[in-house]
């Protein structure tokens, strides 16, 4: 019988992994369970957003100069509050906060640092499109003392876990601990995430591309040539590709993870303050890169493997090309001038 038929919960799955891991203490399992509780709380608020005063903006801006949605603020504070009381975390870094948030000295601290994009795609809240939460977990370098920035500014390959929650037609958790990728769907009647997508593997090559073509005028010529190439009919080689773009990174990524294809957010010349791209390395690109590689895919900034990039600041941005390995390799050839 399949695991889907057995109704394995995410907690049971975590405990299985824990038993198979030498020297595991259960600390990570408890931490991930708190992230799950936080996601359930966020999901509840998302589901009733049209019925209560939680739509719209707070009237403040985040460090990127973007208007903060009420649900952004709620999701951020909910996750930080839940993970900080576990005793397993020493600090949290959030896309919404300028600096690292340390666990106060009077509280028990643990060996993990949690990085979050608390509500990815929040601009889609008021049109009822899917949104999500992205998380990354890292083990701190030092054994004690204040958490320093260098403990956070590390390559994505040093993550111990990463994943996302997607709040859509169903609510899902997709995560990896470096041993493949599994997906769990929330059963509203039980209030439990049940294993629904075991050992997710992305197809080597897809038929879907996801990019905001409204930015076409601001792209470099190699990116334009690649997108034109994807649109050019060539049935023997699986083209043209279909264009699918929701505008929520988690949602576009999730579809392509399951069906194959490539998501792109190239650097553009629209904003001279953001020459390196829009997406945040630590909070968006690196967690999803860790996950996609565990599913057999690839992630690049166009030249380098995302997981090899060392951030210089907490809020570094990068271009992102992520998805099926053959598609990512192909776009790298275009950007390197090796294909036309």
Image (tube, rainbow, N blue to C red):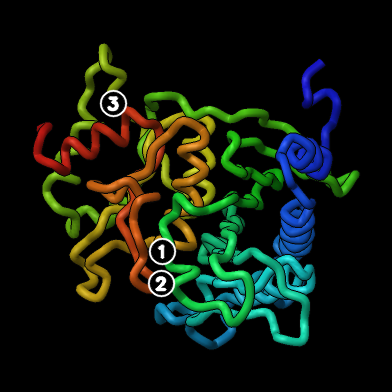
In percent of the image, x 16 and y 38: which residue is there? 334
Q: Nearer the viewer, residue 52 or 80?
A: 80
Q: CA distance from mark 3 to mark 1?
A: 30 Å
Give the residue at mark 2: 315
Say if 23 sits above or below 3 in the image: below
N-terminal-most mark, 1 or 2? 1
Q: Are marks 3 and 1 in contact (CB under 8 Å)?
A: no
In the image, taking residue 129 as reference, residue 198 lies left or right, namely right
Q: Earlier in the sequence, mark 3 or mark 2?
A: 3
Residue at position x 46%, y 76% from top?
Answer: 149
Q: Position of residue 191 (x, y in %)?
A: 86, 49
Q: Which is nearer the eye, 43 or 98?
A: 98
How far across and down, in percent of the image, does residue 197 sit?
A: 67, 31
Identify the mark nearer the N-term, 3 or 1: 3
Viewed as shown, does residue 52 lie left or right of 70? right
Q: Which mark is residue 280?
A: 1
Q: Secondary structure at mark 1?
A: strand
At label 3, counting other C-alpha atoms closer than 10 Å, the crowd grade (few under 14, some 14-19, many 20 or more) is some
CA separation in Å, label 3 and label 2: 36 Å
Mark number, residue 303: none
For the C terminus, the quadrant is top left
User: Circle 3 is placed at which residue position?
Assistant: 240
- Can you say whether 314 is above or below 37 in the image? below
Measure the alpha-carbon separation of dots 1 and 2: 6 Å
Residue 55 to residue 119: above or below: below
Position of the N terminus, as image quadrant, is: top right
Residue 51 appears at what percent x and percent y?
76, 68
Whole-percent x and y of residue 76? 63, 72
């Amino acid at each position: 019988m399949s695991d889907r038929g057995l109704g394995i919960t995410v907690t049971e799955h975590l405990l299985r992994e824990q038993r198979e891991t030498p020297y595991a203490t259960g600390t990570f399992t408890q931490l991930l369970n708190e992230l799950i509780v936080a996601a359930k709380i966020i999901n509840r608020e998302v589901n009733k957003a049209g019925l209560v005063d939680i739509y719209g903006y707070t009237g403040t801006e985040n460090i990127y100069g973007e208007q903060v949605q009420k649900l952004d603020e709620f999701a951020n504070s909910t996750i930080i509050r839940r993970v900080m009381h576990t005793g397993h975390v020493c600090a949290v870094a959030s896309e919404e906060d300028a600096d690292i948030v340390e666990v106060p000295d009077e509280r028990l601290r643990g060996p993990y640092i949690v990085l979050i994009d608390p509500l990815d795609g929040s601009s889609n809240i008021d049109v009822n499109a899917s949104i999500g939460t992205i998380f990354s977990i890292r083990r701190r370098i030092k054994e004690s003392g204040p958490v320093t920035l260098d403990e956070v500014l590390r390559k994505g390959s040093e993550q111990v876990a990463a994943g996302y929650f997607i709040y859509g037609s169903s609510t899902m958790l997709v995560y990896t601990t470096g041993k493949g990728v599994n997906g769990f769907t929330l059963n509203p009647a039980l209030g439990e995430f049940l294993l629904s997508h075991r050992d997710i593997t992305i197809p080597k090559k897809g038929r879907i591309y996801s990019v905001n073509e409204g930015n076409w005028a601001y792209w470099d010529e190699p990116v334009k040539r690649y997108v034109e190439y994807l649109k050019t009919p060539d049935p023997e080689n699986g083209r043209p590709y279909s264009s699918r773009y929701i505008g929520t990174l988690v949602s576009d990524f999730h579809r392509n993870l399951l069906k194959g294809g490539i998501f792109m957010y190239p650097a553009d010349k629209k904003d001279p303050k953001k020459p390196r791209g829009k997406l945040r390395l630590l909070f968006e690109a690196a967690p999803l890169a860790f996950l996609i590689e565990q599913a057999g895919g690839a992630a690049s900034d166009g030249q380098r493997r995302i997981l090899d990039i060392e951030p210089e600041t907490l809020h570094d941005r990068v271009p992102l090309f992520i998805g099926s390995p053959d598609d990512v390799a192909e776009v790298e050839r275009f950007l390197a001038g090796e294909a036309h």
